[in-house]
Image: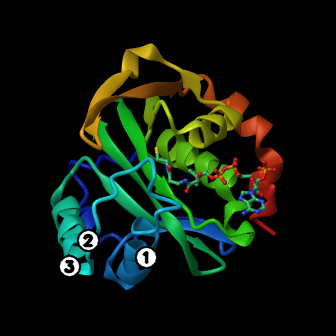
Amino acid sequence: MIDLERLDTRKLPLSYGTERLRLTLNDSRYTEQVVKIRNDPRLNEWIHHDPLTPEAHDQFLQRELERRDALNFAILVDNEFAGVCSLRDIRGTTAEWARLVMPDRVEVRKYAVTVGVLFLSLGYEVLGRASMYCRILEGNRRTRRYVEKIGWRPDPGYDSEIPFDGERRKLLGYSLSSAEWPEIFAAHRDLLAGIVS
Ligand SMILES: CC(C)(COP(=O)(O)OP(=O)(O)OC[C@H]1O[C@@H](n2cnc3c(N)ncnc32)[C@H](O)[C@@H]1OP(=O)(O)O)[C@@H](O)C(=O)NCCC(=O)NCCS
């Protein structure tokens, strides 16, 4: 099990997945593409949509790299940028899966569910989490359907509220325990096999 307290993740060339689809620690190589998708109104309706500049993104990444409880990834399909996603609150026995955005192109989105399963694999099999959780704005129906398709279970224990567009909005919590992971893995085995060959 990786103990983030003892590893200097700032220097790790951390990468997880296969040549077809992998997660790799996000750095300024991907800034232009990250800024492009984060400023796309079709993609950021349900995430913070204040305009993002390359400088602000690089400063965010720098701050995040100093943290011991967060890992920010670029998603790569055939070595091409295919979105971003993070693990945060990597503390105790849990972690939050967060900030997933993928460009809306079929050659990328066809891997959306596989990306979700890869993050669970990273959390349970590499980081040794006992449980993980995610939170989605109530109105983000597409992403709610997506996480439910993967197998995440609604967990009101993680429900919360955030200020969003000047209002208090409800975040719906979902969680999964490591005991449930083998069943999720089995259900998506073919998808994972599809990125190996
Ligand atoms: C989160 C996100 C990556 C999930 O991807 P998604 O496309 O919504 O997920 P879906 O389950 O609907 O899509 C995957 C499926 O649709 C298909 N698909 C998705 N987009 C497609 C497109 N443009 N054309 C054809 N097929 C498409 C995929 O092939 C896949 O098929 P499957 O059902 O057989 O697995 C995406 O919705 C996103 O980036 N949203 C914006 C940011 C956001 O709100 N993030 C969440 C923050 S909590």
Q: Residue type at mark 1? A: Lys
Q: Which mark is residue 36?
A: 1
- Left or right, 159 with reference to 15: left
As drawn, the residue found furthest toward the front would be 166
Q: Residue type at mark 2? A: His
Q: CA distance from mark 2 to mark 3?
A: 5 Å
**Label 3 residue SS:** helix
Image spot of residue 59 (x, y percent): 17, 71
Label 2 environment density (alpha carbons within 10 Å; few <14, some 14–19, many ≥20): some
- Left or right, 29 with reference to 180: left
| Residue 167 appears in the rendering | yes
Q: CA distance from mark 1 to mark 2?
A: 11 Å
Q: Would you say the residues marked 2 and 3 are in contact, meaning their CB atoms lie under 8 Å apart?
A: yes
Quadrant in which residue 79 is drawn: bottom right
- Left or right, 6 with reference to 192: left
Q: Residue type at mark 3? A: Glu
Mark 3 Cβ inside 8 Å of ligand 1: no
Mark 1 Cβ inside 8 Å of ligand 1: no
Q: Which mark is residue 57?
A: 2
Residue hosting label 3: 55
Image spot of residue 108 (x, y percent): 67, 68
